[in-house]
Every structure is written in structure tokens, then in C-alpha cells.
Image (spheres, coloured by chain):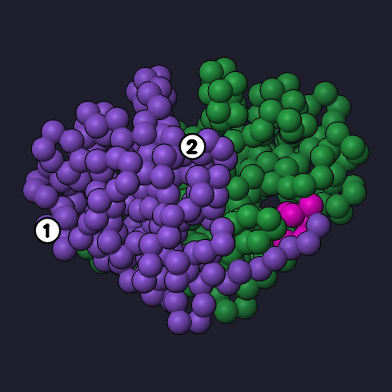
Chain colours: A purple, B green
Amino acid sequence: MARLDIALAHSYRLLNHGPTVLISVAALGRRNVMAAAWCMPLDFDPPKVAVVIDKSTFTRELILAAGEFAISVPTRAMLPRVVAAGSDSGRDGDKFTALGIDTFAAQQISAPLIEGCVAWLECRVLPEAHNEARYDLFIGEVVAASADSRVFSDGRWHFGPDDDALRTLHHVAGGAFFVTGDMVTGQD
Amino acid sequence: MARLDIALAHSYRLLNHGPTVLISVAALGRRNVMAAAWCMPLDFDPPKVAVVIDKSTFTRELILAAGEFAISVPTRAMLPRVVAAGSDSGRDGDKFTALGIDTFAAQQISAPLIEGCVAWLECRVLPEAHNEARYDLFIGEVVAASADSRVFSDGRWHFGPDDDALRTLHHVAGGAFFVTGDMVTGQD
């Protein structure tokens, strides 16, 4: 596979279909990763995202220290690790090691990006104390984006018949997910 | 089909998988409907949602007047109307009439709910002037929810082999959508 840099103005397309994502961060000599279903684009250019990160999470503690986080879009093949990343706590030990999650370096931020995912967005927190305190809502500006060219190129997702293991996930509840399905096109 | 009331604490499950939705509203003797891909749950109980509604939209003008809005989750069968609802403006005339979109009355709010959809959330705006002005971000509390029992019951989506036309939509860009695909379950 090849990782392809994505134009910032196209980066919203990596999240527009509503996949569940992995949020990763490094700070204070620690690192962590968690799953998040509540994550969406918030603006096109400069691109922004909104993500809900509960007060109880170790990830939140590290994001507040780092002022940065990464979004990685996981695949069907990663399902057991996504479920585990969403239920275990990084306070109990390094989740990457425990779950066998490999990482690689981001371009613009210190947060590790997750190997095996198909899209990555590097974000700097736009501090919004009221939203963070009242709604657990964090807003980030996307400062770099990349994708797996096997399934995203020319600004488009294109899952082919051999790409089922690379399709993205959409959490419903309790460890049940929908896989991203067929593409359809509507004409106005 | 039968419309089933959904417990408020389960209403997030209607949006958790990230579908593109229709936002509808009635105020000032007018009504409108628009498509929104940037809409997500924000809390479980009491349930809240976050949705991006651009400053240029007629829908926003009516929501600010009404203090309420409805979310309807459209289906693959509704694709052409979803695309049209996302590109036409209600300022130019009633979109419901123009697009042949039928409605029915909500339980708790004045906004019309959209026939042919498979889930509905009735929302009251939690006024957040800063978020609305800076991010076009509106936050609502869900005060009633219902779903089409053919595809959602016992707190779960269940799209069967005969339900392809009822599957929900996930906008990518430019009128291209993914249909919600297979369900998979991961064990931690």
C-alpha cells in the first residue's frame, strides 16, 4: 500500500460518511488510543473536526496536555482491536503494546498514527473550554491528512470487490458495527 | 410499516453509525428541509445532538425562529430527493411540494417529520451563540424519537435481505453516497 497526502480542502471526505475512528495522542511521556463514534467534520477550509472525548478518558488528559490529537480511520480487519481500544483504559498500561497496535510518525504533530488504518487526520486543538467542560466536545483544525491509495485517491473513496477487509466501520452500540456498503450516486 | 417510539436513552443509536440526515423545521408560517452529513450524537441521557447548519441556509433562519428542529434519517430509496434537498434552497419555494416530500406531525415539536425515512429525532435547540456564530454548530436536546420497526426495534438496527431500499445513506461528496452495509460484531 502507499500512503497518499490528501489536500487539506479534501480532508473532510475522509470522515464525511460517518465512520467510527481511533483517536491517538502522545504527551507527558505517555501515549494512548481510544475509539470514537462521535466525530464529524466541522468545516471545509481550513478544515476542522468535532469529536466527543469523555471526561473519564486518559486520552482526554493527554490531549489537554498536548494540544493535539490524531484521527485514524480503522478497517473491518481491525474490528477486534477497535472494540478493545474502545473499552480498555490506557491508564492500566500501554494499549498499543497490549493490543498489538503499530504506529508511525505523523507529519505535523507528535501523536502517533495507527498502522492498518486507511485514513489519517492530524489535528491541533482549537481550545473551547465551555464546549469541553459542558459537552465533552473538542474542536480541532486539521493540519495534515493522508490516506491509503488502494481505497482513497483523487479525492474519492473507491472500495473494490477485493477491498472488503479495508472497508470502514460504523459503530451502532455494544460492539456491533455496520461496514461501509455499496456506493450509490444521486442526480439532482 | 409501523412507527415505534424509541426510548430517549436509546435514541443515539439512530445516528451512531453516521448516516446523512434530513433537517426539517417550521416557523414564521414557512417550513423547510435540508440534507446534513455533519450531524452526530453528543450525549446519551438526556440525549443531545450536534449538527452543522450553514449561515446561508433558509433552514437556519427558521431554526433560530422556532428553537426546534427535526432529524429524519432517509433511505436509499429516497436518494434523489436527499440530493435535491441538499442543493435546492427553500427560499425559492416550498421544497416539500417541489420534491414531493410528504410529512407527518411530530409529537413534541412543530417541525414536520419526513415520510419514507426510517428514524426521527425531535430536538429543541440548546442556544449556544458562540458555536452557532463561529462554527455554524447547533446543539439540540432530543425530546422524542421514533423509528420504522421493520428495520429498528429492541434498540437495534436490523436490515434484512429484503430491506435494501430502507438502508441508510452516508454522503461522501458531490452526490455520491455509501449505503449502510453488513453488520459485524467484535468481541473484546
Left or right placement of residue A108 versus residue B169 in this view = left
Nearer the observer, B146 or A18: A18
Q: Residues within 10 Å of mark 1 (few under 14, many from 20)?
A: few
Q: Position of residue B85 (x, y in %)?
A: 77, 48
**Which contiguous range is marked in magenta?**
B79-84
Left or right placement of residue A145 versus residue B2 in this view = left
Q: Position of residue A144 (x, y in %)?
A: 41, 45
Residue at the image position 51 percent from the left and 77 percent from the top: A160
Which mark, residue A98?
Answer: 1
| Above or below, B89 relative to B168 | above
Q: Which residue is mark 2?
A: A48
Which mark, residue B119?
Answer: none
Q: Position of residue B88 (x, y in %)?
A: 81, 45
| Mark with earlier residue (2, 1) | 2
Left or right placement of residue A31 versus residue B58 in this view = left
| Marker count (numbered) | 2
Q: Residues within 10 Å of mark 2 (few under 14, many from 20)?
A: many
**What kind of residue is marked 1?**
Ala
| Above or below, A56 relative to A5 | above
